[in-house]
Amino acid sequence: MKTIIGQLLIAIISIQLSITTSQNTDRVGLLALQRAWKDKLLEWNSGSDPCGGDWADIKCNNSRVTSIILTSMGLTGGLPMDIGQITELEYLILIGCNFIGQIPSSIGNLENLEDLSLNNILTGPIPSSVGNLKNLSWFDLSANQLTGSLTVSDGITPGQDMLTQAIHIRLGDNKLSGDIPPGLFHSEMTLRHLLLENNSFTGNIPSTLGLVQTVRLDRNSLGGDVPSNINNLTNVNEMDLSNNSFVRSNVPLWFSSLRSLTTLKMQHTNLVGELPADLFSIPQLQNVYVYPFVD
């Protein structure tokens, strides 16, 4: 009996130590952020528990930090590697805070993230480690100065194609370049909104894009043919492919098959000819921007 009681006590102590260690890890991670941001406006107290004290813009569950939401606070600094220590984070929303530098690869340690929104002045590539964020639903890195290309997994290194739970991917208004890889889109994804506008993507639109429901690819340097299977976007309500350099071609007849369409934008795309009359039979259609066509 004493042996059993002793084992139980050891187990309880081990659990308590594990919880305490995790809590301390969260605190260390948060204090590293505070040091990196160098701003007195952030009311985080180095001598108290972030889940027991009054730490602004921090939310917890079961004594673990699960949410950091900071918007338009005028902070400075960047994202340190220590952010990867706050492993129970579900919401990391840092919008309009003027953060600079690169997104650390440790962001991939936050495997419980559901919402990652970083709209600042961040530079460098999107870490391939974001492919580890299997629970991510909302992925927004728009309005930064990110460079590099989109990546897909190769069996060793993760890629953005592994974000199978992502419904919304927004990477517009950056400096991303290269081709849009066909492997980025596949049938296991739940992706509905893909917003890649105002970057420097080149090459063709991959035919696998037909799996996505909403798309913005305007203001890039895309070429080749507009893939005909975009007409599979039967639930799309806004499609914008303007200001690209597609192969000179007739206005696609499949425009009129997008029966949920409310807005169509395809200006400056090398299209020629007339709009199909059936396009204007779409019941919800409100806005059409397709001119000027090439003579």
Image: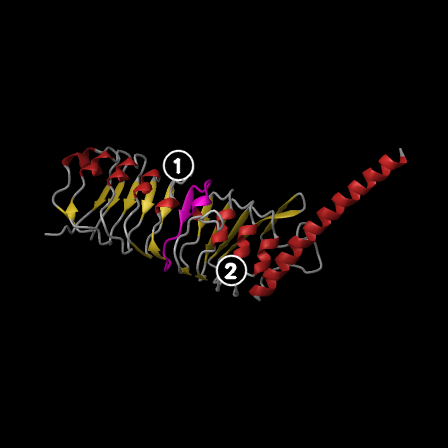
Give the x, y percent position of residue 16. Answer: 75, 45
Q: Amino acid at mark 1?
A: Ser
Q: Which residue extends farthest front?
A: 155
Location of residue 231 by image quarter: top left
Q: Which residue is at a point 31% across and 45% down the rendered structure image? A: 206
- Residue at 38% x, 58% y is 174
Describe the element under mark 2 as helix, strand or loop.
Answer: loop
> Hey, which residue is sitting farthest right in the picture?
2
Which residue is identified by label 2?
Answer: 73
Residue at position x 45%, y 59% from top?
A: 120
- Relative placement, left or right, of 78 versus 279 is right
In the image, residue 167 lies in the stretch drawn in magenta: yes
Image quadrant of residue 8? top right
Place of residue 160 in the rendered image (x, y in percent of width and height, measured from the top left): 44, 48
In this image, 141 relative to 182: left or right?
right
Nearest to the eye among marks 2 and 1: give it.
1
Q: Is residue 23 above or below residue 44?
A: above
Residue at mark 2 to residue at mark 1: CA–CA distance = 40 Å
Q: Does 129 lie within the magenta span?
A: no
Q: Quadrant of residue 239?
A: top left
Q: Mark 2 or mark 1, which has the lower sequence index?
A: 2
Q: Main secondary structure of the magenta part?
A: loop
Q: Position of residue 192 (x, y in %)?
A: 38, 40
Range shown magenta: 161-176
Mark 1, other Cα within 10 Å: few <14 / some 14–19 / many ≥20: few
Amino acid type indicated by mark 2: Met
Q: Nearer the viewer, residue 7 or 173?
A: 7
Residue 40 appears in view: no
Which residue does the numbered mark 1 point to in the structure image? 187
